[in-house]
Amino acid sequence: MLAYARDRRRFLLFGRPRQVGPETHRHRAEVLLESLLTLGPTFIKLGQLLSTRPDVLPPAYIDVLSALQDEVPPAPWPEAKAVLEDELGPVDERFAEFDTEPISGASLGQVYRARVEPDAREAAHIDGDPTATRTDGAGGHEVAVKIRRPNIEALVRADLRVVKWSLPILLYFVDDARSFSLENLAEEFSKTIREEMDYEREAAMLAEIRANFAGDDRFRIPDVIESHSGPRVLTMEYIEGTKINDLETLERKGIDRTRIAENLERAYLQMIMDDGVFHADPHPGNLAVTDDGQIVFYDFGMSGRVDPFVQEKIIDFYIAVANQDIDAILDALIEIGTLSPDADRGVMAEVMEIAIQDARGEDVEQYRVNQIVGQIEDSIYVFPFRLPKNLALVLRVATVVEGVCVTLDEGFDFISTATDYLTEEGYREESIRQYIDETGQQLRRTGESLTRLAPKAERALDRLDRDDLFVRIGVEDEENVFDKLAKRLVYGMLLTMSLFSMGVLYALEAPRASIVAAIFSVIVTVQLYRSFRKPKSIGARPQFTRQNLRQRRGKE
């Protein structure tokens, strides 16, 4: 934090920013990664959240932290067993069989495989068929049992207090845009981690999302075994599948990876645009593919809702992207609160054009990227992007899903898939009708204005004829040009006077006075030079997931 503060102000409390290269950022990010792993579960979760926030951290940090996983050793079985039995009762009585080796470990909980008797499934159905059952030679149904990590509640509360106390100090060293994002990040993190520890909430979200996909054979969502679940234990139907980024196995099984990528994007478009409730942690560890090509979703601890206003604006954004209407894209980003209204629209328009080109799977010419970077450095001194709290999880989903889809199919066309979805669901047709209605209203208002224009023009001409018309002119000076010019004039006059005084004092053989005049001249010269220097840029570099993936594969 001290190093980041010195980048903002060379002497912490004052001074110009320092220029820091990508290697320095990467080194600091690696140090931060090690610190987060040392600090434990809560801070690992914080690092995972930061890895999806390019509005808070530079690209090098995002790249390093994106590799952060829940590298926390599982709690010993006796401790996990105590939590399980405190919730459900004796393990031997509640489960027909229980494997004490966890199949998945995370910072807040761990998952075990077990079996329950057939009657424990109650209303749980396989593939939406109430008559279907899943049994094997050992008898019973296979389930996954998620147990909250022992004593994690007290540890999370203590860690959240540390985050809360540290935030005011950190906010002092950042600009207003990042301050806005950091405050939202802290609030979102506190809310998200508490929700993720509440397994009753997770069960309810899982059931709701499962109901939304009922009858869609492209997806499999595990059912909850309510009789074996509680606030700290969640028992679900166990669905086996191939990890979604295990490309070799998927290829060997003859599964169409492009179709899987398309179905995955469509699933999240439906969750965000139509359903308003979505699975918010789609990293490869939480996604699998069955031998039939169905996508399986695991772990609904991190899930969220989209309010109607945000849904509407997201739809506007996707329609604008589908139509490649750059102005409409920028308008949607501004209305939703993601893009600052003060951002340079010309530069941001070019950034969006490159982003669309990359999303279509097309190669982005490096010279264009370099050109955009130069324009950003010349014209944007305040970070233009910010992230409202109601969009943080949506951004996480968009970022991670993009990475998964590109891994499945490097040439995957996001925009084409989104456009087809919008067309099939009638969003584009509705947008056209809305545009026609708005155009008709605009024409009506234009006609009304024209009827009022003639009398007003006649009155203005009468006043002009009587010499009774005054014109008031105001000059906007957003760049403080006049202020800078005045300073330079004053510094120039002071420098001239000080140099003249130094020469006169030296001629009158007053060396001490001439030295004072010389020092004053140097100070004024420095101030005059600084007034001509341009502000330093943010030094940002655009990130393109697809191109980064190609670079990494090339290195491998």
Image (cartoon, helix red, strand yellow):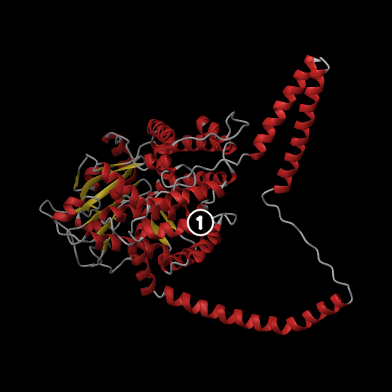
Q: Position of residue 43 (x, y in %)?
A: 42, 37
Instruction: Pick the quarter of the image with the C terminus.
Output: top left
In front of the other: 16 or 395: 16
Q: Quadrant of residue 40?
A: top left
- Residue 67, compared with residue 39, is above or below; it is below
Total tally of numbered discs in the picture:
1
Q: Residue, x 56% and y 44% (percent of image)?
A: 179
Q: Is residue 225 rendered to the left or right of residue 33?
A: left
Q: Residue, x 54% and y 63% (percent of image)?
A: 331
Q: Residues within 10 Å of mark 1 (few under 14, many from 20)?
A: many
Q: Residue furthest left?
A: 137
- Residue 52, compared with residue 348, is above or below; it is above
Which secondary structure lies at badge 1?
helix
Q: Position of residue 81 (x, y in %)?
A: 28, 38
Q: Residue furthest front?
A: 507
Q: What amino acid is labelled 1 in the image?
A: Met
Residue 154 makes an appearance in the image: yes
In front of the other: 253 or 377: 377
Q: Position of residue 118 (x, y in %)?
A: 20, 57
- Residue 516, compared with residue 137, is above or below; it is above
Q: Residue, x 25% and y 63% (percent of image)?
A: 259
> Which residue was labeled with disc 1?
348
In front of the other: 275 or 336: 336
Q: Residue, x 74% and y 25% (percent of image)?
A: 520
Residue 281 makes an appearance in the image: no
- Residue 242, compared with residue 436, is above or below; it is above
Q: Position of residue 352 (x, y in %)?
A: 45, 58
Q: Is residue 137 rendered to the left or right of residue 550?
A: left
Q: Is residue 203 rendered to the left or right of residue 6?
A: left
